[in-house]
Amino acid sequence: MAGNSFGKNFTLTTFGESHGEAIGGIIDGCPAGITIDLEAVEAEMKRRKPGQSDIVTQRKEPDSVKFLSGIFEGVTTGTPIGFIIENTNQKSKDYSHIEKIYRPSHADFTYDKKYGNRDYRGGGRSSARETACRVAGGAIAKQMLTDITINAFVSSVGEIFIDKPYQDLDFSKTEETAVRCPDLPTAAKMIKRIKEIKKSGDTVGGTVTCVIKNVPIGLGEPVFDKLHADLGKAMLSINAVKGFEFGSGFCGAKMKGSEHNDLFNEDGSTQTNLSGGIQGGISNGMDIYFRVAFKPVATIMQKQQTIDSDGNTVEMQGKGRHDPCVVPRAVPIVEAMAALVLADFWLRLRLSKL
């Protein structure tokens, strides 16, 4: 199975399955001499971990990261940083009923057809459990990007949207509610909706918006390595993601050029930022902002018709512990993937100046 590594200069390779002994990763390309705040790493992991509120899966995992190499006395050595995250609360029996059954909108069918077998316990390698490794890698990347701030938040759940521009939001309030929406009245509506959906045995989707500030001019390469192209790939690699837009996004397609153009100020900044901080694939120093769409979680607690590995039509119903809405726990994952992309391009820019 290929495709387990991300990045060119700053790379993250992950391994492990949802119900295996552990998951983990190797970070390569991290420069020597960076002081690592291990408490900050653990804080990032706690934001993603399951069981943190009554609107997410109740699987109880501490998600503590054990670093095996590449950090000595709290400082990076420049060698590969290896780490593991033990799985401590698997309930594989919750999945015995789907050993030969393909769950609708899951990777069961495609994995089985491509590889000839699959780990049906929690989805194995296709499980969102793998994203814990991304958050660990992103936590290290964030500590490289000392002046850059990355703030993601839930901007919608189902039909409930924040009706304010991100400039009017206080990101310090994002962690004040279980849904991670900085607009508290909207957050209350979102939480109520998720609880209603959960009670009915169903799931609901939503969007996560990310705002990156203090990005230096010059990150990104023309043609195939555009900064927004790598951000798009990063976000679309996250489980359950169905859409990515940056800057004006799809709304820009409705506008005229005279409305959409970002006119310059004398210092090189722009009067508006419909470009989303990236022009020609290269950061221009303005805020980078984008939105990521997540589908409803595929496992629902309602009966559905599906097929088994012999092609028979069967009825199934989800069991076990699952998120009724993935977006609250996706916030730190979006931030982590953004940090990995920026760290990679930051190293490219630095190397180009040597």
Image: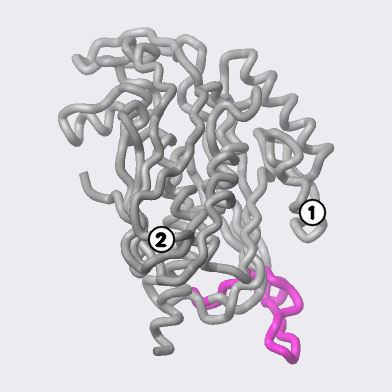
Q: Indicate whether residue 254 is drawn in magenta.
A: no
Count the marks: 2
Say what secondary structure mark 2 lies in: strand
* Residue type of the residue flagged with mark 1: Leu
Question: For the N terminus, which image quadrant?
Answer: top left
Could you tell whether 278 is left or right of 350 in the image? right
Q: Which quarter of the picture shows residue 145?
A: bottom right
Residue under the point 55% across and 21% down:
58
Residue under the point 15% across and 29% down:
116
* Residue type of the residue flagged with mark 2: Phe
Could you tell whether 185 is left or right of 110 in the image? right
Q: Which residues make up the magenta segment?
A: 257-282
Q: Decide which of 205, 66 is in the foreground and name it.
A: 66
Question: For the C terminus, which image quadrant?
Answer: bottom left
Q: Which residue is mark 1?
A: 169
- Residue 253 is at least partly visible in this image: no
Q: Which residue is mark 2?
A: 72
